[in-house]
Amino acid sequence: MAAVALAVREDSGSGMKAELSPRPGAAGREMTQEEKLQLRKEKKQQKKKRKEEKGAEPETGSAVSAAQCEGQTRELSGPGNQLGTRGEKIPAGRSKAELRAERRAKQEAERALKQARKGEQGGPPPQACPSTDGETPSGVKRLPEYTQVDDPTLLRKLVKKPERQQVPTRKDYGSKVSLFSHLPQYSRQNSLTQYMSIPSSVIHPAMVRLGLRYSQGLVSGSNARCIALLRALQQVIQDYTTPPNEELSRDLVNKLKPYISFLTQCRPLSASMYNAIKFLNKEITGVSSSKREEEAKSELRAAIDRYVQEKIVLAAQAISRFAYKKISNGDVILVYGCSSLVSRILQEAWTEGRRFRVVVVDSRPRLEGRHTLRSLVHAGVPASYLLIPAASYVLPE
């Protein structure tokens, strides 16, 4: 009985292909009836396995080990025959789909092993997916550019924009604390408007006054700074006049850009201020060109009033009504500095009958906690005041 073996050959376009051929030792004589039946059975088995492989996607090689990556050989054995290229034995009942899947799995495992070796040698780790804007491959959000003033490249980018907009830039006064060198550090000796001519400047006087109040700490707190910005923008819109051959929806947005750059030079904007600026820009670009200038300006000022009422005043009321329920009788609450919303929550909780005590922690140079202390004492809330070095003594309470 002549033996029949499956021979595997490489095809340039389609990968591994299997074909049936008589054993070399059996060449020259015809196959017997039993051999023909055996050959037909093997063909039927292969066709059946191909149909099964088409119905189910072959697994790729997530669990292929590094030891399997090293083996690159394949061999199909008949009764005692080896046809692999490098000595690896493969059972005779394997279909072409199984062989292709195994080959693909080994190639992917080899590629992953090479990338892992590169990472161990100090190379950059492979990226599983493209990172989104503002995030690193590890998922950590990238800091905005204005908080990286110790980077000379980013600093040059920040300085170019105000120069193009004719906005005075913050001067480096030389004395910096290394621990906080990545943050903009304010100097009372070098004012931002020291060499700026107010009458000939492109900056509106209301914005100059607001920027100086920001830089000197006269306006602090997220809500207070946002409301002050919106009131100054209302004044800017009131004094605005559309130039000839221009549209208000385009020209006013361009007018506001140097104003925002100036405020950023005075003090970096808060998140609430960014949201307010985005809202106003959207409202301005939505102004129809067919509207009269006075009507459009009146609508913009009314939109700012609605924003203050809905997004700041009513939002603070909703937060305080929900948050004061978290306070129980006998609680000792520690607060730091001054927050108008926190003070409002504490006062509303006291008004609703919750009995508790407040410890106000403060620090130099601004000592903003004194404002919190005054508002709480005025509302009848028992409160004590201390500086931050003594905070460890009240923590057990």
Image (tube, rainbow, N blue to C red):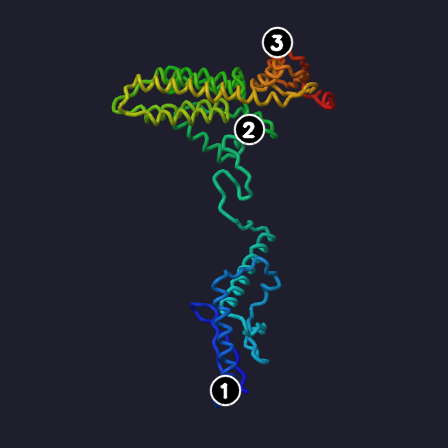
Distance from the alpha carbon under mark 1 to that under mark 3:
110 Å
Q: Is residue 43 above or below residue 289?
A: below
- Residue position for label 2: 183
Q: Is residue 364 above or below residue 127?
A: above
Query: Mark 2 or mark 3, which has the lower sequence index?
Result: 2
Element type where label 1 sits in the image: helix
Mark nearest the camera among 1 and 3 is 1
Which quadrant is home to the C terminus?
top right
Query: Mark 1 or mark 3, which has the lower sequence index?
Result: 1
Q: Nearer the viewer, residue 24 or 136?
A: 24
Q: Is residue 77 visible?
A: yes
Q: Are marks 2 and 3 in contact (CB under 8 Å)?
A: no
Residue 254, x across and y down, in percent: 36, 26
Element type where label 2 sits in the image: loop
Q: Are marks 1 and 3 in contact (CB under 8 Å)?
A: no
- Residue position for label 1: 33
Residue type at mark 2 is: Leu
Query: Mark 1 or mark 2, which has the lower sequence index?
Result: 1
Crowding at dot 2, Cα within 10 Å, few <14 / some 14-19 / many 20+, comes out as some
**Residue at point 56%, 43% (across, down):** 138
Q: Is residue 106 above or below residue 394?
A: below
Q: Nearer the viewer, residue 53 or 242?
A: 53
Q: Is residue 199 left or right of residue 289?
A: right
Q: Is residue 35 left or right of residue 376?
A: left
Distance from the alpha carbon under mark 1 to that under mark 2:
90 Å
Residue type at mark 3 is: His
Residue 247, x across and y down, in percent: 29, 25
Distance from the alpha carbon under mark 2 to that under mark 3:
36 Å
Residue 175, x across and y down, in percent: 57, 25
**Residue at point 45%, 15% (across, down):** 209
Which quadrant is home to the N terminus?
bottom right
- Residue position for label 3: 378
